[in-house]
Amino acid sequence: MSQLLTMESVEQDGSVIWTVRGEIDLASAPEFERSVVAGGDGAARSVVVDLDRVAYLDSAGLASLVRLHLQLGQRGRHLKVVVADGTVARSTITLAALDQVIAVFESLDGALVA
Amino acid sequence: MIAATVPEASSDDVCLLMVHRLVPSQTLAVSVLDGAAGLAAARHALRDWLADFGVVGGTIDDAVLAAGEALANAVEHAYLDAAEPGEVQLAATVADGVLELIVSDCGTWRRDAAPGPRGRGLALMRLVMDEVVLASSDAGTRVTMRRSLEVRS
């Protein structure tokens, strides 16, 4: 695994929840994407990606999120992104208006009940 | 001779760091030599340098994003035909309250390159900086970006 990125996943209430720490950029985005895709093969209907602790997210990471949204959707699963207002990742997502395309939540609890 | 005045254990890096902390340098120059793997180190260097100036957090995040996107574009597209990653440079200066970031490479600008990540990256750069100017020639591509700074007093 890249030194830039650490990812942990748990299953809870029918969702796979990924907690992501570190930086998602051109170098680490492919690994981020592969991990989430591989973890979306189980019974869970929702894949939650928590980006609150991500210190950097660039356009390569945004492209990964769009592809994940499409790929998981094709398999009948929902991508939910948790990223609180005021975080670096939220800023990039909002700038790119990606919150118009993918489901973005302020909190993990909010994503799990949606 | 420099070697005679510097203790054996000191590296150039250590000396630079000490000077850096006393008086923020007016310019920062960073080279990325190892492609995408080197992007994070260049971003971190810019972040630390801006923090030394007392630049506020949101502005630092914006500048780091703009520089990161420009560097990533260069790393990804400038040396497509090369066997190994070529050099990409970041230069940052602050003058009269304006931050200027220049990202340059010696590769070939691909006007026919498909839009996508590159287009999105350029859009982000334009959103977070006051001015983004692209200049390309046979010698390479140069992206010059400027933004007014809010500095903590």
Image (cartoon, helix red, strand yellow):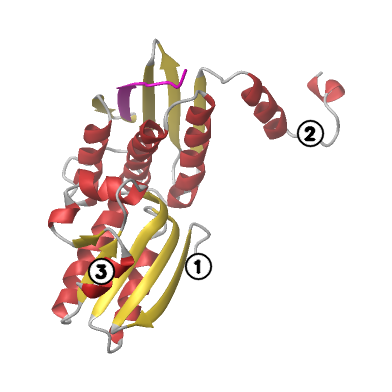
Residue A43 spot, x, y in % from top left? 27, 89
Q: Is residue B81 above or below residue A74?
A: above
Mark 3 — residue? A111
Tag shown at residue B14: none
Q: Are marks 3 and 1 in contact (CB under 8 Å)?
A: no
Residue at mark 2: chain: B
Q: In 3D space, how far apart are the residues under numbered discs 1 and 2 (Cα atoms)?
A: 32 Å
Determine whether the residue tagged by mark 1 lies in a helix, strand or loop.
Answer: loop
| Residue B106 seen in the current view | no
| Residue B56 seen in the current view | yes
Residue displayed at 31% across by 29% down: B143
Q: In 3D space, how far apart are the residues under numbered discs 3 and 2 (Cα atoms)?
A: 51 Å
Residue at mark 1: chain: A
Which numbered disc flags the more N-terminal residue, 3 or 1? 1
Mark 2 — residue? B10
> Which of the 4 image quadrants contains residue A53?
bottom left
Q: In the image, what residue type sits under mark 3? A: Ala
Residue A69 spot, x, y in % from top left? 20, 68
Magenta residues? B142-153
- The outermost residue toward the bottom is A43
Mark 1 — residue? A1
Q: In the image, what residue type sits under mark 1? A: Met
Residue B6 spot, x, y in % from top left? 82, 25
Determine whether the residue tagged by mark 3 lies in a helix, strand or loop.
Answer: helix
**Front of the two marks 3 and 2:** 3
